[in-house]
Image (cartoon, grey):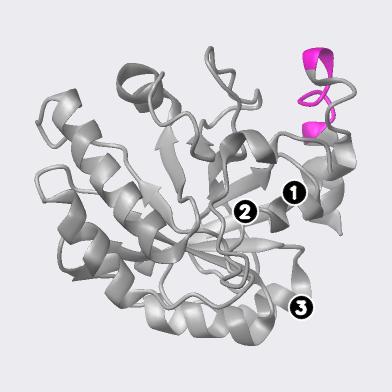
Amino acid sequence: MRLLAFLFFLFCPVWSGRNTGVLDPPAALILGIDVSHHQKRIDWRQLVQRSEVHFVFVKATEGGDFLDSLFSENWAWLREMGIRRGAYHYFRPKRDGALQAEHYLRTVELQPGDLAPVLDIETTDGRRPEIVRREALEWLQKVEKALCVRPIIYTNQYFYERHLAGYFDDYPLWIARYSDEHPRLNTRSWHFWQFSEKGRLPGISRPVDLNVFRGTPRMLDRLCWYPQEGLPISSSSLDAPP
């Protein structure tokens, strides 16, 4: 509860000004984290008992063959603990986008209610931006076709403005910006904000990324995979009132 109180005061100014009437401060308290093997083994029971984490993104894959060593363990624990979970792929532009998508799809088994797949794209690996975007689109389209859900794009604000602005606008967006001021994008809105990489939470021995979802629980549910619906999620549909 102390964490919730801190976030309430942290985010009150975030949702003021031009956002007044669109989102109220309590909605900003949908707090999440993202983890990988860098956090080492996590005591998920302790985390659940002593914190207010509502969703967790877990690193699953990278490039064409890398598998995060703790993905399977983290993925299973999150299901057992009943925490909303999502799996992300770290994109390597020098590898074929479709092959990277296949690697992700072979690795991650979604259950109804899991968050949509995430493409983490934050480096060009020395390739031209148009090639990076082309291969990223291959990944996005292949995953969307296989699962009938539109993936989420994760990136940092600098990379987005330099290489992605004006592209992929129909995909939900997760932006990293380590600041007490939320990201302001010229061409579109964001859905998740990674606001710190220095979080300290019970059960996690190392610093962890902190995120907030810009919306209500019902809006977050729209970003999840439900195979019986079979309809892609669009970015614009998430901006509609709940």
Asked if the residues shown at circle 3 and circle 1 are in contact, with their CB atoms under 8 angstroms apart, the answer is no
Mark 3 or mark 2, earlier in chain: 3
Where residue 158 appears, as percent x and y from the top left, is 38, 22
- Judge from the rendering whether residue 37 lies leftward or rightward of residue 44; answer left or right: left
Name the amino acid type tagged 2: Leu
Numbered disc 1: secondary structure? helix
Q: Is residue 218 above or below residue 39?
A: above
The verdict on residue 20 being magenta is no
Residue 98, by quadrant, is bottom left
State the separation of the CA atoms marked 1 and 2.
7 Å
Which residue is found at the position 67% from the left and 39% from the top? 237
Q: What residue is disc 2 on?
A: 223
Residue with the mark numbered 1 = 219
In the image shown, does 65 or 179 lie closer to the viewer? 65
What secondary structure prevails in the magenta region? loop
Q: CA distance from mark 3 to mark 1?
A: 25 Å
